Amino acid sequence: MSALARNLEAESSEEETLAGIVRSAVGTVPGVLSGGITQVHRRKVRARVPTEELVRLCDGAQQELGEGPCLDAIWEHETVLVDDFATETRWPRFAERAHRLGVSSLISFRLFVQQDTLGALNLYGGHDVRFGEESRLIGEIFAAHAALALSGAREQRQLGEAVASRDGIGQAKGLLMAQYGISGQRAFDLLVRASKEANIKLTEVAAWVVREHENPGGAPRPATGSDRPGR
């Protein structure tokens, strides 16, 4: 595990880090043949870093059927164990599909930090494999690494978005100050007022001001709240 931690530190991207965790889990947890990570965004299942196509097909089947052990691990339990899909009754439709695909056994771990669920680490076993306490304990360690990797990547994205938003608003303020000879506070107030009156996010108003400066008359108007789909 120490070697794994050092190797993961050297990975250059979130995808490579997660792939390294899954590969290591597959090679370490007794009885495991393949694996992957399931993430759910707005109730849509996304298969990440699967070690083989079978893993992606299983995630796709759970999305289609709206049931399955990986989804239960994410929404209801910390760990879900399946000894044999041929006799599994908790998810009858998915169990039948998984059995047809050639899946025999599975252990799925919820990926979470504090109370925030991020997905599930899913490890698929061969025929006649019964995951015991050793497999569960080792798998939980890999699941903890995966959860930390996902959490860290999300925080980095949020930080990047916050910095970009701040820079965009600052640039728009500077342009308004130069164009109208007003103070920074007055320029910011104008942006906020435009945002509220047009029902457009402040960052989108700022981005439009910058685009309009770079291409006068050619910048497309941001969609208002009433223009957006579903409104």
Image (spheres, rainbow, N blue to C red):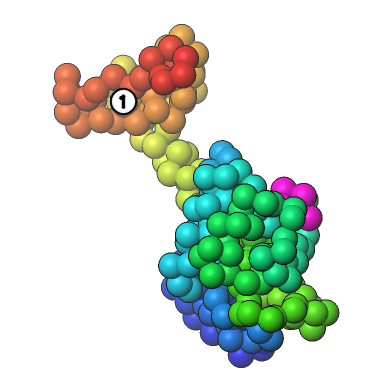
Evaluate whether residue 117 shows in this view.
no
Mark 1, secondary structure of its residue = helix
Name the outermost residue toward the top.
197
- Name the magenta segment's main secondary structure: helix
Q: Nearer the viewer, residue 137 or 145?
A: 137
Q: Position of residue 49 (x, y in %)?
A: 48, 67
| Residue located 49% across and 53% down the image | 60
Establish if 78 lies above or below 177.
below
Q: Is residue 53 magenta?
A: no
Q: Position of residue 202 (x, y in %)?
A: 46, 25
The quadrant of the image that shows the N terminus is bottom right
Q: Amino acid at mark 1?
A: Val
Q: Position of residue 77 (x, y in %)?
A: 78, 55
Evaluate whether residue 217 shows in this view.
yes
Q: Residue beneath label 1, please?
A: 209
Establish if 190 lies above or below 125.
above
| Range of magenta residues | 72-77
Q: Position of residue 133 (x, y in %)?
A: 83, 79
Question: Is residue 71 found left or right of 160 in the rendered image?
Answer: right
| Residue located 17% across and 28% down the image | 215
| Residue located 53% across and 63% down the image | 100
Establish if 227 lies above or below 184.
above
Name the outermost residue toward the right.
133
| Residue located 39% across and 24% down the image | 205
Q: Nearer the viewer, residue 94 or 135?
A: 94
